[in-house]
Image (tube, rainbow, N blue to C red):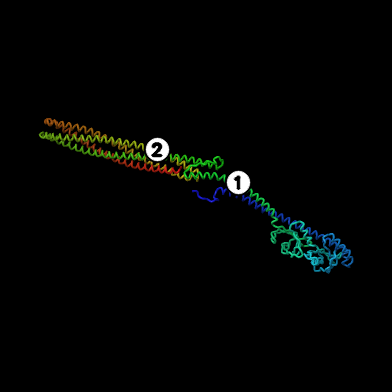
C-alpha cells in the first residue's frame, strides 16, 4: 500500500515552486530596487524642482517688491514730495506724481505719504488720513530702513494686506523727513503663487501664512501659525526638508530679502513617488504576466520531468509485487529520463530472464532431489537385504565351522580306530562296523557341509551382485550430485548477475537484491550438500570395494573349502569301501591299516585347514556385516541429505513463486 504524502512533498510541486521562486525572487528584487531607485531619484529630482520653483516664485515676489522699492524711493527723492513735507506746498504735484507712479502698477493699491510723527499727510486716493506711528513698517522706515509689514487686516476695508515702506530723506543727508508706503492686497501674492501651479505659500516674518496658491485666505479666517516650522527656526535662508506636520510632504523654501517673507513650495510624498509607483506597478504587472508564463512553463516542464519518474515508479512498484511490467512510453526521449526508462526496461528484461532461468533450475533441482531421495530409499532397502544375507552367511559359516570341528573329531576317532585295528585285529569287525557307521555319518556331514558351502558360495555371489548394484547406484548418485553441483553453480552465477543488475538499479532494485542474495545462499547450500553427498558416496564406494574384496576372498576360500570337502568326501567314500573290504578280508586290514593311518593323517590335516578356512570365512563374514552396517548408516545419511536437498528445492520454488 502506498504511503500518503503531502502535496508539497511531490517532486512536481517542488519543481514548480523552485522555478517560480527563481523567477519571482529576481522580479520582486528588481521591482523593489526599481521602486526604491525611482523613488529616490524622484525625490532628488523633486527636491531640485521644488527648490527651483521656490526660487522662481521668490524672484517673482522679489520683482514685485523691488519695483515697489524703486518706485517709492524715486518718488521719495522727488522735489514736490520733499517740498510738501517741508512746507505743505506743491501738494497737488506730489499727489499727481504719487498717482502716476501708482497707476504704473495697475493693481488698484494705494501709495501713502506720512510725516515723522506717523500721521498720514497725503494719499494717492481720497481715503481718510490716519495715524500709523505704531505700525511696524512705519517704525522701520522712520529709522531709515525700507521695511515690509507683517500680515495685517484693514479695519476700514476688512482686507488682508501688507505694506512696504521706504524713508524720505532730506536731500544730501540721511535725515528722515517722512515715510512713503504702498500697501498690497495679499490676494495679489496669492495670484503670483498660483501662476505656476502646485502648492506654494508665503509666510511673513512672524510665521503667519500670508498667502497660499491653492486657496484665498479671508480676513475672517483663523491665522495659520508656522512659527515652529524649520524655515522659521533653522536660521537658513533657503533649504529643502521633509515634513510630516500635515501629511507627508517635501518643502523647499527661500527667504525673500526685501520683505523677509518665506516663499515655500511643497509637494506630497505620494505625488513625488507617483511616477516611481507607476513604474513599479508597470514592472510588477509585466512581471506577473511573465511570472504566469514562467509558471505555465514550469508546470509543463515539471510534468515533463515527473511523468517518466511516475512511470518508472509504477514499474518498480509492480516489480516489488513480483510482476515484470515494462514501460511503453517515453522510450524515444533522448534525455536522461529516456535513458532511465530504457535502463529500467532493460533491468526488467534481465530480471525476467534471470527469474525464468532460476525457475527452470529450481524445477530441475526439485526433480533431481526427488530422484536422489528415491535412490537413497532404494539403496537403503537393498542395504537391508544385503545385511540380512550377510547375517545368514555368518550363521552358515559358524555352522560350517562346527561341522568341520565335528569332522575333525571324527577323524581323530578314525585314527584311534586304526590304531586299535593295528593293536587288535579281533576287534576289527566291530571297529569296521563302527567305522562304517562313522564314515557314513562323516559322509553325510561332509555332504551337508558341501551343500552349505555351495549355498555360501551362492550367497557370496548374491552379495557381490548386490554390492555391484550398490556401486552402480552410488555411481549414478554421484552423477546426479555432479548435476546438482552444476545447477548450484549456475544458480550462484545467475544470482550474482541478479545482484549486479539490482545494484545497477540502485534503490529501486534493493528488494530484488535481497531475493538474489537468498537464491545465492540456497545455491551455496545446495553445493555444500552436494559435496557432502559426493563425499559420502565416495566413502560408500570405498566400503563397497572393500566388501567386494572381502566377498571375493570368502568366495575363494569357500571354493578351496569345497575342493577340500570333495577330496575328503572321496576319501571317506573310499574309506567306506575299504571298511567293507575289511569286513570281507581282515587280512588286508592289517596291511591297509598303515595306509589308513597315513590317509587319516592327511584327512586330519585337511580338516585342520578346513577349520582354519571356516574360521577365516566367519571372520570375513563378520567384517562384511560391519561394512554393510556402515553402508546402511551411510545410506541413511544420504537419505537425510536427499530429503534436506528436497526441502531446499521446495523452499527455492516457494521463493521463485513470488515472481509472476
Q: Can residue 627 be seen in this view?
A: no
Q: Locate residue 553: give its quadrant.
A: top left
Q: Name the spot of residue 85 as percent of width and height, x first.
A: 87, 67
Residue 483 marker: 2
Image point (55%, 50%), residue name: 7
Residue drawn at point x = 62 percent, y = 47 percent: 293
Mark before the other along the chain sequence, 1 or 2: 1
Decide which of 237, 463 is in the foreground and name it: 463
Q: Residues within 10 Å of mark 2 (few under 14, many from 20)?
A: some
Occupied quadrant, residue 368: top left
In whole angstroms, how far apart are the C-alphas of marks 1 and 2? 62 Å
Q: Mark 1 points at which residue?
A: 297
User: Up-down: is 414 above or below 127?
Assistant: above
Find numbered disc 2 in the image and state the secondary structure of the residue it sits on: helix
Locate residue 222: give its quadrant: bottom right
- Numbered label attached to residue 125: none
Specify whether 153 is left or right of 80.
left
Amino acid at each position: 500500500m502506498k504511503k500518503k504524502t503531502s502535496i508539497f512533498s511531490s517532486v512536481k510541486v517542488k519543481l514548480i515552486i523552485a522555478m517560480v521562486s527563481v523567477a519571482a525572487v529576481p522580479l520582486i528584487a528588481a521591482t523593489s530596487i526599481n521602486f526604491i531607485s525611482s523613488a529616490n531619484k524622484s525625490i532628488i529630482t523633486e527636491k531640485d524642482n521644488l527648490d527651483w520653483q521656490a526660487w522662481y516664485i521668490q524672484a517673482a515676489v522679489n520683482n514685485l517688491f523691488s519695483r515697489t522699492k524703486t518706485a517709492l524711493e524715486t518718488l521719495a527723492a522727488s522735489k514736490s514730495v520733499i517740498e510738501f513735507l517741508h512746507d505743505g506746498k506743491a501738494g497737488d504735484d506730489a499727489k499727481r506724481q504719487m498717482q502716476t507712479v501708482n497707476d504704473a502698477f495697475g493693481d488698484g493699491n494705494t501709495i501713502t505719504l506720512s510725516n515723522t510723527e506717523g500721521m498720514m499727510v497725503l494719499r494717492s486716493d481720497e481715503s481718510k488720513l490716519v495715524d500709523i506711528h505704531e505700525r511696524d513698517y512705519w517704525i522701520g522706515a522712520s529709522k531709515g530702513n525700507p521695511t515690509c509689514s507683517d500680515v495685517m487686516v484693514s479695519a476700514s476695508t476688512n482686507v488682508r494686506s501688507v505694506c512696504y515702506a521706504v524713508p524720505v530723506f532730506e536731500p544730501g543727508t540721511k535725515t528722515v523727513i517722512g515715510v512713503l508706503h504702498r500697501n498690497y492686497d495679499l490676494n495679489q501674492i496669492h495670484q503670483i503663487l498660483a501662476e505656476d501651479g502646485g502648492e506654494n505659500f508665503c509666510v511673513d516674518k512672524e510665521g503667519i501664512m500670508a498667502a497660499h496658491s491653492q486657496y484665498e485666505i479671508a480676513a475672517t479666517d483663523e491665522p495659520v501659525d508656522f512659527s515652529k516650522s524649520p524655515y522659521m527656526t533653522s536660521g537658513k535662508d533657503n533649504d529643502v526638508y521633509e515634513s510630516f506636520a500635515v501629511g507627508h510632504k517635501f518643502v523647499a523654501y527661500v527667504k525673500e530679502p526685501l520683505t523677509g517673507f518665506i516663499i515655500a513650495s511643497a509637494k506630497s510624498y505620494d505625488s513625488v513617488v507617483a511616477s516611481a509607483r507607476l513604474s513599479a506597478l508597470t514592472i510588477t504587472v509585466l512581471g506577473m504576466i511573465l511570472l504566469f508564463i514562467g509558471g505555465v512553463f514550469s508546470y509543463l516542464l515539471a510534468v515533463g520531468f515527473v511523468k517518466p519518474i511516475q512511470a518508472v515508479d509504477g514499474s518498480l512498484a509492480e516489480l516489488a509485487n513480483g510482476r515484470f511490467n515494462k514501460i511503453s512510453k517515453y522510450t524515444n526521449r533522448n534525455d536522461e529520463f529516456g535513458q532511465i526508462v530504457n535502463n529500467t526496461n532493460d533491468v526488467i528484461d534481465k530480471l525476467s530472464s534471470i527469474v525464468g532461468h532460476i525457475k527452470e533450475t529450481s524445477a530441475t533441482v526439485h526433480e533431481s532431489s526427488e530422484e536422489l531421495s528415491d535412490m537413497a530409499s532404494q539403496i537403503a532397502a537393498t542395504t537391508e537385504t544385503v545385511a540380512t544375507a550377510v547375517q545368514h552367511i555368518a550363521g552358515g559359516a559358524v555352522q560350517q565351522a562346527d561341522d568341520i570341528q565335528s569332522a575333525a573329531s571324527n577323524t581323530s576317532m578314525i585314527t584311534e580306530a586304526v590304531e586299535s585295528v593295528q593293536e587288535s585285529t579281533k576287534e576289527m569287525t566291530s571297529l569296521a562296523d563302527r567305522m562304517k557307521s562313522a564314515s557314513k555319518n562323516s559322509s553325510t556331514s561332509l555332504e551337508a557341509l558341501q551343500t552349505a558351502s555351495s549355498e555360501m558360495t551362492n550367497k557370496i555371489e548374491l552379495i557381490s551382485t548386490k554390492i555391484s548394484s550398490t556401486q552402480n547406484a552410488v555411481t549414478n548418485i554421484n552423477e546426479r550430485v555432479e548435476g546438482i553441483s552444476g545447477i548450484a553453480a549456475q544458480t550462484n552465477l545467475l544470482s550474482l548477475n541478479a545482484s549486479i543488475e539490482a545494484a545497477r538499479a540502485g534503490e529501486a532494485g534493493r528488494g530484488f537484491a535481497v531475493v538474489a542474495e537468498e537464491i545465492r545462499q540456497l545455491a551455496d547450500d545446495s553445493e555444500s550438500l552436494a559435496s557432502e553427498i559426493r563425499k559420502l558416496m565416495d566413502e560408500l564406494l570405498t566400503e563397497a570395494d572393500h566388501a567386494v574384496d572381502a566377498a571375493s576372498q570368502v568366495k575363494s576360500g569357500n571354493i578351496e573349502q569345497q575342493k577340500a570337502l570333495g577330496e575328503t568326501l572321496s576319501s571317506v567314500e573310499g574309506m567306506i569301501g575299504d571298511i567293507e573290504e575289511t569286513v570281507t578280508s581282515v587280512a588286508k586290514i592289517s596291511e591297509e591299516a598303515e595306509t589308513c593311518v597315513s590317509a587319516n593323517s592327511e584327512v586330519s590335516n585337511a580338516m585342520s585347514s578346513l577349520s582354519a578356512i571356516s574360521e577365516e570365512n566367519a571372520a570375513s563374514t563378520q567384517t562384511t556385516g560391519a561394512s554393510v552396517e556402515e553402508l546402511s548408516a551411510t545410506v541413511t545419511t544420504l537419505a537425510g541429505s536427499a530429503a534436506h536437498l528436497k526441502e531446499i528445492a521446495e523452499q527455492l520454488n516457494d521463493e521463485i513463486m513470488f515472481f509472476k
